[in-house]
Image (tube, grey):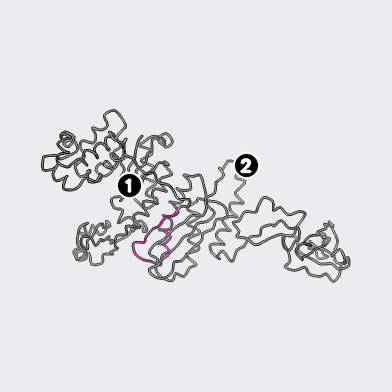
Amino acid sequence: MYWLALRLPDLPLQVFSRGSADPGLLAITEAHPRQQVVAASPAARARGVRAGDSVASALAVAPDLQLRPRALELEAATLTELAQWAGRFTPQISLDPPDGLVLEVSTSLRLFGGLQALADTLVDELRTLGLHGQLGGAPTPLAARWLAACRPGTLIPADHGWQDCLSALPLAVLADAGVGQDILLLLHGIGARNLGDVLRLPRDGLARRQAAAVSAALARARGDTPDLRDWFVAPARYTATVAMPAPTDQLAPLLFAARRLFAGQAAWLAARQMAAEYCRLTLVHESGPTTVLDLYCGAPSRDEARLGLLARERLAALALPAPVEALQLTSGAPVALAPKSGDLFGDPDATQHNAGLLLERLIARLGTDAVIGVQPCADHRPERAWRPVRPATRPPAHASAPGLRPLWLLAEPQALRYRAALTLLAGPERIESGWWDGADVRRDYYVAQHKDGALCWVFHPLDKPDEWYVHGYFG
């Protein structure tokens, strides 16, 4: 087995800063044990704000500092989002709170071209989510996490004697494995400065000093005892949240944050070779109810740029009731995406694809209630042979209409005053149906040409052959 550990030491800051290209002067605060700064943006650090500073001290050096309280729930949700995204690389993922993941990647190495190529791809694609982290690799998950924390970028090969590479790591890594500060001080007091020094100490001596947790942690890291992990179980639909560095009602920063979400959804769908017909973008305001935007695609898709265009259309036409402090994305039910094949004479689906893009933009700009589609129904009566649907809805396989039907069907048949104005071209097509529901129809239909050249769909009732009606027009 081989493990990659991904650690985000600045996660308290990143859950807010990822929603903007430039978070500006931003600091994250925590009230325990006192009101203090736990993370600061690069701009804030340049002004002298440091983690551990009191809020008063931070404001003294940067009076215009934007303060946000630490959001532990959002940090946990971001780790879950990362685990969903990491399914792009391996299905064997384990959450490693409070700030990381571990991935078992031995079965994925060949697919990505080797260990280094996989690690480079993971780090590069992480940036599309607006996040950055530290990566380490080793044959055990705990060793990989220690390397990510103290030697970012180090990938220990699974060779004989690989455990020797851990000896130079500092004692502080043991805190990650649950070793208390009092034990670390005790080890320091007897002259231990790194893991190699601890490994040279007698095991029974450590036990007498109530440092059994140290031996247990080293055994897990070196692979001497199992390090059992719970596998992450991906939800049926992709969900993610991006918080804004500061509440805003401006289009550009909202679109920037939304694109972070679309990138994560695209990776999640790609890992499953799936697509979705729609997704729901929820805008969380400082106060009042949320604003919900349902983004519909004309066909199943995982194209993040396509969703970004739809979001732009919807947001540009929207009057927000209050500034937005967070965006939430939930994908629609994923469906299998047919593999795309080439064609000697060009893309046969290009016209349909372009029509779908136009339809999506119309829905985004005008709203879902302003654009409808028509779907055939299994009924011979023209009035009941169709129903309005959302345009992205695919027709059922059985809903092919019999015979020739006009594109324009009148809401009600219109009586013809002069039958002589028509020339019958095709027919009759007899329709007798509906006796079971009280809407009985008994008619003979014809394709006819009016004297002005229009092609019409006309009929007469079977019991009244002299009464003629026009029911629709052909294009």
- For label 2, the residue is 345
* Residue type at numbered disc 2: Phe
Q: Quadrant of residue 208?
A: top left
Label 2 CA crowd tier, 10 Å (few <14, some 14–19, many 20+): few
Q: Is residue 259 above or below residue 270?
A: below
219 to 277, vertically: above or below: above
Question: How far, Cα to Cα, is label 2 from label 1?
Answer: 51 Å
Give the percent coordinates (x, y) of residue 99: 31, 50
> Which numbered disc, 2 or 1, marks the residue closer to the eye?
1
Judged left or right of residue 98, residue 201 is: left
Query: Looking at the image, which residue is at 65% across and 62% down?
Result: 388
Which residue is found at the position 22% from the left and 61% from the top?
Answer: 36
Q: Nearer the viewer, residue 24 or 298?
A: 298
Q: Provide the secondary structure element on which disc 1 rests.
A: strand
Q: Secondary structure at mark 2?
A: loop
For badge 1, the amino acid type reads: Asp
Q: Is residue 109 left or right of residue 335?
A: left
Instruction: State the residue position of label 1.
Output: 96
Q: Please determine whether, in this image, residue 111 is positioned above or below residue 263.
A: above
256 falls in the magenta region: yes
**How dense is the environment of label 1, judged by Cα within 10 Å: few (below 14), some, or many (20 and up)?**
some
- Give how far across and how far down residue 236 sits, in percent: 48, 50
**Region rendered in magenta:** 239-263
Splitting the image into 4 quarters, where does residue 77 fall? Answer: bottom left
How many numbered circles are shown?
Answer: 2
